[in-house]
Amino acid sequence: MNIFYKRFWKNTLLYFLIVAFIFYFHSSEYRWTEYLTKPLALLFLFNYFISTGKNLQKGIKKGIVLGITFSILSDISFLLRIDVSNWFLGGTFIFSLLAIYSYAYAFQFTTKKRLPIEAIKSITSVNLFLSLLIIAFPISIFIIEELELWQYPAILFQLLLWVLVSQGLKRQDHVNEESYYIVLSGIVLYSITTMLLTLQNFTQNVFSFKDIPVITYFTSQYLIIIGAIFQNPNIEKE
C-alpha cells in the first residue's frame, strides 16, 4: 500500500473516532465537550486537506479551505446560540451560506475545464429530483406550519442548496468517477442534513431526528473534502 492510501485510511479512522466521540456525548450531560470536538473534527479535515491536496488547482484549494473555515465558524456560532431565533438570524445562517458558496466555487475547477456556477445548461432529471427532495418538501412543511417572520430566510437557504447540488452534478465526465461520486454523495448528504435540521428546528411537533444529523453532517463534510482530494490525488511511492 502506497503512502497516499496509508495516510488516507489512518486519517479516516482518526476523524471518525472524533465524530463517534461527538455523537456519544451529544445528548449527555457532557455535551459541553462539543465546544472543543466539533471545531476539532473540521480542523482535522482542514489539516489533512492542506497536507494532501497539493496537486489540486488553486481554485479548488481556495474554495475548499474557505468552505471548511466558514463551516467551523458556523458550528461555533450554532454552539453559542441562545435560542433558535438568535441562531438562525446570526452567524450560523450567514456562515453556512458562505460555506455552501465556497464549496460550489471550488467544484467549478476540474482537470478538463471550468464549470461556472451560473451555467444552468446541465439541469437533468436527477437534478430536478434532488431539488424536489431537498427544496419542495421542506417548503411545503413551512407552508403547512405557518412560518414566523424570522423563519422565512430558511426557504432561501434551501433554494441556494440547489446551486451546490447542481455544481456537483456538472462534474460528471470532467473528473474521475471516484472523485465525482464521492463529492456528489457528500453534497447530497450535506443537503439532506440541512433539510433534517431545518425540519427538526421549525417543526418539532412533527419531526424529531434526534442525533442523526450529527453523523450525517460530519460524514458529508468528510465526503466533500475527500472527494476533492481524489480529483487529483498525490499518489506517492514508498
Image (cartoon, rainbow, N blue to C red):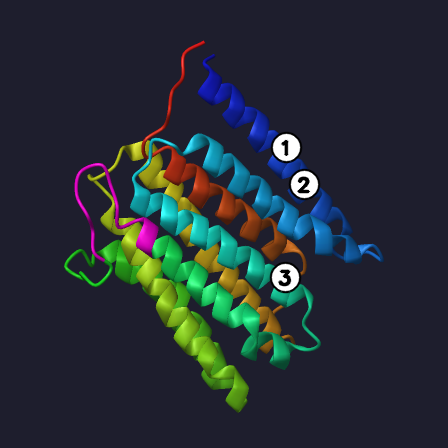
Estimate the spatial distance between the alpha carbons at disc 1 and disc 2, rounded to whole Å.
7 Å
Tell me: residue 173, above or below residue 101.
above
Q: Are marks 1 and 2 in contact (CB under 8 Å)?
A: yes
- Which residue is painted at 39% across and 38% down in the image? 227
Gap in angstroms between the C-alphas marked 1 and 3: 21 Å
Q: Is residue 218 left or right of residue 153?
A: right
| Amino acid at pointer 3 | Ile
**Of label 1 and label 3, which has the lower sequence position?**
1
Q: Residue at x 52, y 24 (%)?
A: 7
Look at mark 3 in the image and give the residue it sits on. 76
Across and down, in percent, residue 154 comes to: 47, 76
Mark 1 = which residue?
Answer: 14
Q: Which mark is residue 18?
A: 2
Q: Residue at x 45, y 9 (%)?
A: 238
User: Where residue 225 sits: x, y (%)?
Assistant: 44, 42
Q: Where residue 82 is drawn, which disc sits there?
A: none
Does residue 159 sit above or below 11 in this rendering?
below
Q: Is residue 109 magenta?
A: yes
- N-terminal of the pair, mark 2 or mark 3, is 2
Q: Horizontally, is 169 left or right of 222 in the view?
A: left
- Residue 178 in view: yes
Q: Is residue 113 magenta?
A: yes
The boundaries of the magenta stretch are: 105-116
